[in-house]
């Protein structure tokens, strides 16, 4: 037995309280699908039990009273009394037994978090009242941002700049097992003529100080210039779940954004504008957020919650990675099909006093190089790292290893264990816990199925090996297009059954 195990047993590691506390601090990486489905589980259980009897429906009550021959004023009073009685009976005879079944199921339902490279899906089981306007929203949501196990979901057409559109955020804290509803920005604060949408994603920060499990959402919206184009003036909108400003959007004007300038075009008399489109937003510490344009670079704000006038730095992509003009018409395409970026947090322990030092943050970037006229087997996967993004002196460093698609095809795990033919790869996703490890999705359109999915791979670029893979069922497709990202969940989120997180929500991972 090794020394670490012996020391753990001698220090009382078998104590259930100590083991539970240790498990709560452990984190595991998961690959999450950004698309989240809603299920009205209470209605499903009611249908399983035979549905709602006709005598408890609104139509039945109204027909009975209308046939009674009462005067109009008597009829209105009778309908009101009858409906109240029916609702009481419905809750006692229909909803209460179904709710008891749900509680029993969720207490025994195991977590369905899957180990990468398998993909995990999040399901929110909801129970809206019959007259709730929330029933009109789509039965799905999109994970727009995350900080570890705090996930911010878009529900409905909630997009900055679309002030007239309904919609809202749902913030799911997997560790605290809670769901918070955050409304969209106020129409008077943002209009289609005042601001520009900077791209996709929302900044999410877990408020770690005080360990209250709070969170903050941050929207960055550049203002429009006189010609309706993006300008360097911008507004931060911040929503906090705790503190003196909790429960409302706080508006703060930023210092001028250091945006890259568009390249000049021939015969263009107008002055060049600015170009920046955030493909993702992520946290890099307790008070630092990054908005990354996968073709240009990233905007970094070191004190996004503390400053009265937040300042930003622009960090360009590594040498040779910037794409100034994606195509002849200036269209960006879908950069996340061949690139991604994330932040990795490392916590080292001081050997002298066995205490954790200040966490170090590293930005990781992966890109597929080639494909512009070169054979597909020569497409290369390359990683870069930027140590401590808060330090302006930090520079990008190329990863120690790389692999081509041909190397992956020739790997024994790919060729022999998985038995796969040569297939194109897409959507590289960086591991948040393992250096030089990338997850890839293989696409097989040979059967004539657009977006046909075949397999997910775990690839170690430094060791030049395919570590593992998982196949999708034959003919498997996704719609909308696949959108997977890596995040870290605390062990408690993974090992506990699905639980009720509010009067209308039950959250859990899995099918």
Image: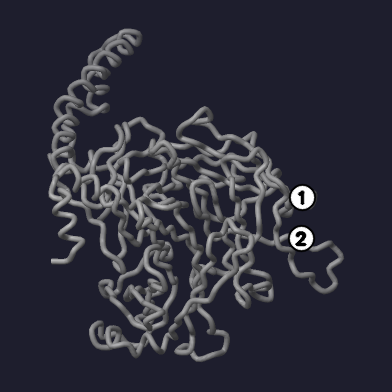
Q: Which residue is mark 2?
A: 273
Note whether 365 is above or below 220 in the view shown.
Answer: below
Q: Going 48% across and 89% down the picture, which residue do you hit?
A: 378
Q: Secondary structure at mark 1?
A: loop
Is 281 displayed left or right of 253 in the figure? left
Residue 142 shows up from this direction? no
Of marks 2 and 1, which one's residue comes earlier in the chain?
1
The quarter holding residue 327 reads: bottom right
Where in the figure is residue 276, as x and y percent of width and height? 65, 60
Label 1, residues with CA under 10 Å away: few <14, some 14-19, many ≥20: some
**Left or right for 480, reference 410:** right
Check disc 2: other Cα within 10 Å, few if <14, some if 14-19, many if 20+: some
Q: Are marks 2 and 1 in contact (CB under 8 Å)?
A: yes
Q: How many marks?
A: 2
364 up-or-down from 409: above or below: above
436 or 332, nearer to the observer:
436
Q: Look at 49% across and 74% down and name the residue there.
A: 383
Looking at the rendered structure, the secondary structure element under dot 2 is loop
Residue found at the far front of this picture: 352
Residue 180 percent location from the top left of the image: 40, 37
Q: Nearer the viewer, residue 377 or 343?
A: 343
- When asked about the image quadrant of residue 93, the answer is top left
Q: CA distance from mark 2 to mark 1?
A: 10 Å
* Closest to the observer, 135 or 99: 99
Quarter of the image that includes the C terminus: bottom left
Q: Which residue is label 1 attached to?
A: 225
Residue at 63% across, 75% down: 319
Compare residues 408 and 57 and report the one nearer the observer: 408
Residue drawn at (21%, 47%) of the image: 496
Which quadrant would residue 501 be assigned to in this image?
top left
């Amino acid at each position: 037995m090794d020394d670490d195990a012996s020391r753990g047993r001698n220090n009382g590691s078998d104590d259930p309280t100590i083991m539970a506390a240790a498990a709560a601090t452990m984190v595991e990486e998961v690959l999450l699908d950004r698309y989240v489905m809603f299920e009205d589980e209470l209605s499903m259980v009611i249908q399983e039990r035979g549905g709602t009897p006709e005598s408890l429906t609104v139509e039945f009550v109204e027909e009975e009273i209308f046939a009674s021959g009462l005067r109009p004023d008597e009829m209105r009073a009778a309908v009101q009394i009858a409906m109240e009685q029916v609702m009481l009976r419905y809750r006692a005879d229909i909803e209460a037994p179904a709710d008891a079944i749900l509680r029993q199921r969720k207490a025994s339902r195991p977590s369905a978090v899957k180990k990468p490279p398998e993909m995990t899906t999040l399901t929110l089981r909801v129970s809206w009242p019959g007259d709730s306007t929330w029933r009109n929203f789509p039965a799905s949501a999109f994970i727009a941002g995350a900080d570890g196990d705090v996930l911010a979901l878009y529900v409905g057409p909630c997009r900055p700049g679309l002030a007239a559109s309904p919609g809202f955020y749902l913030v799911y804290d997997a560790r605290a097992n809670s769901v918070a509803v955050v409304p969209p920005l106020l129409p008077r604060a943002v209009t289609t003529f005042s601001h520009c949408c900077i791209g996709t994603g929302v900044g999410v920060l877990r408020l770690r100080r005080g360990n209250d499990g709070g969170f903050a959402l941050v929207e960055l919206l550049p203002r429009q210039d006189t010609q309706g184009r993006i300008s360097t003036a911008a507004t931060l909108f911040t929503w906090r779940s705790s503190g003196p400003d909790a429960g409302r959007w706080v508006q703060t004007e930023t210092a001028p954004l250091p945006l890259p300038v568009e390249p000049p075009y021939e015969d263009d008399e107008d002055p060049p504008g600015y170009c920046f489109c955030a493909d993702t937003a992520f946290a890099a510490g307790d008070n630092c957020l990054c908005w990354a344009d996968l073709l240009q670079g990233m905007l970094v704000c070191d004190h996004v919650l503390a400053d009265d006038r937040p300042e930003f730095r622009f960090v360009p992509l590594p040498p040779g990675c910037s794409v100034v003009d994606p195509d002849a018409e200036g269209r960006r395409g879908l950069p996340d099909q061949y690139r991604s970026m994330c932040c990795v947090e490392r916590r080292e322990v001081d050997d002298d006093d066995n205490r954790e030092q200040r966490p170090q943050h590293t930005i990781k970037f992966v890109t597929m190089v080639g494909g512009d006229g070169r054979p597909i087997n020569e497409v290369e996967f390359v990683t870069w790292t930027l140590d401590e993004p808060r330090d302006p002196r930090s520079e990008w460093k190329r990863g120690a290893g790389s692999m081509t698609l041909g190397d992956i095809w020739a790997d024994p795990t790919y060729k022999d264990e998985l038995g796969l033919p040569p297939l194109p790869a897409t959507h590289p996703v960086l591991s948040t816990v393992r250096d030089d490890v990338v997850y890839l999705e293989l696409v097989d359109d040979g059967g004539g199925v657009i977006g046909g999915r075949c397999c997910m791979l775990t690839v170690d670029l430094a060791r030049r090996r395919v570590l593992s893979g998982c196949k999708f069922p034959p003919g498997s497709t996704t719609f909308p297009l696949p959108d997977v990202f890596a995040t870290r969940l605390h062990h408690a989120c993974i090992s506990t059954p699905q639980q009720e997180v509010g009067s209308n929500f039950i959250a859990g991972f899995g099918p």
